[in-house]
Amino acid sequence: MIDLHSHTNSSDGTLTPAQLVALAKAQNLEALAITDHDTFEGYDAAVPLAEAAGLDLVCGIEVSTRFRGKSVHLLGYFLNHPPMEHFRTWLFLLQESRRERNNEMVRKLNDMGIGIRLEEVEMLGRSITGRPHFARALVQQGYCKSIEDAFRIYLGEGARAHVERKEVNLPEAITLVRDGGGIPVLAHPIRLGKEDRAEEERWIAEFVDSGLLGLEVYHSDHKQVDVERYQSYTRKYQLAPTGGSDYHGDNKPDIQLGEGRKGNLNVPFSILDDLRRRFPDN
Ligand code: AMP
Ligand code: ZN
Ligand code: FE
Ligand code: FE
């Protein structure tokens, strides 16, 4: 079993890279991809630890993009090979724009009489500080009863302290990943939220025209019918199938590394084998 979608506390997971590597070994995973949001910090830290533990570690990233007003997540694999400087520079710019946004959210909260400081929020995050860390700070300081309340009242889309995040368009992000030497893969396609399956397929076909190379067929949120539908798209559009749990530690306690939700996941090593065959030197 492998897991090609996981998060450390470098983004919005709760385990350190060392703890995640140890968990992957304890679960007998044959390979693990760390796909933190907008940062390689967790992956970079895990490289020597995975090597010492004899774990096959895959370089990954997850970026939020926009497509026709919707937020769409894109995974990138194998970005540790040159030329990657260009891509890392882009990530740095993303982090700068997050910082501006975080300052603005602090200002909004302060204006409402909530005496929260950015340094306090940043202590909860690491290289990436986002709304989940704001939520935790609001709960810890007694302004909200729960994370859900924090999002409902202050941080959720349209809520009082919400600030839009600058996101690139999906086609642009696909190009950035490919120019960085990586494989762009559409994450959890079920979250496109297309009840109309014909429309879902049209969107995916458009992404393929923009250079998409893979589809996350296996995911904790996918039912068996979804898996079969996405498998058929990979054949029709010659996309590489990938899969992973989207493990976030205690931030999403119902999801287990490798096993997904209530064991609904079991991604075989052949998926990674196939990915490497399609894109040699990885
Ligand atoms: P950001 O990238 O800073 O906009 O934060 C996005 C993250 O916030 C998502 O990945 C979710 O983990 C989390 N999130 C968004 N909405 C909610 C919500 N209603 N309740 C809990 N977590 C949420
Ligand atoms: Zn996440
Ligand atoms: Fe995602
Ligand atoms: Fe994810």
Image (cartoon, rainbow, N blue to C red):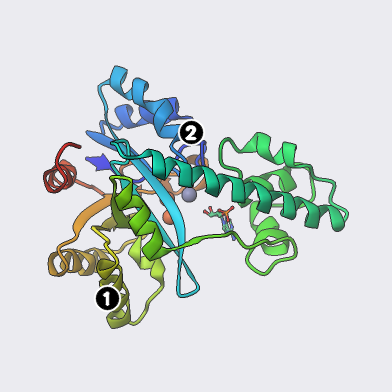
Tell me where residue 78 appears, x and y as whole percent: 28, 41
In the rendered image, which quarter is residue 150 located in? Answer: bottom right
Numbered disc total: 2
Q: Amino acid at mark 2?
A: Leu
Position of 210 compared to 124: left or right? Answer: left
Say whether mark 2 is within 8 Å of ligand 2: no
Query: Where residue 264 sits: x, y (%)?
Result: 29, 53
Q: CA distance from mark 2 to mark 1?
A: 35 Å
Left or right: 15 as drawn, with respect to 130: left
Q: Quarter of the image for the N terminus: give it.
A: top left
Q: Nearest the camera: 267 or 159?
A: 159
Q: Residues within 10 Å of mark 2 (few under 14, many from 20)?
A: many
Tell me the residue at 21%/70% (across/down). Answer: 229
Residue at (73%, 54%) from the top-left corner? 104
Question: Considering depth in this image, is 7 or 239 the residue closer to the camera?
Answer: 239
Q: Secondary structure at mark 2?
A: loop
Q: Residue at x 28, y 45 (%)?
A: 181
Q: Amino acid at mark 1?
A: Glu
Residue placed under numbered mark 2 in the picture: 15
Q: Earlier in the sequence, mark 2 or mark 1?
A: 2
- Say which mark, if any, is on residue 92: none
Q: Is residue 97 above or below residue 13?
A: below
Determine the residue positioned at 17% across, 68% down. 237
> Residue under circle 1?
201
Q: Quadrant of ligand 3?
A: bottom left
Q: Is residue 38 visible?
A: no
Where is residue 151 drawn, in percent x and y? Answer: 66, 59
Closer to viewer: mark 2 or mark 1:
1
Q: Residues within 10 Å of mark 1 (few under 14, many from 20)?
A: some
Relative to 37, residue 223 above or below: below
In the rendered image, which quarter contains the C terminus?
A: top left
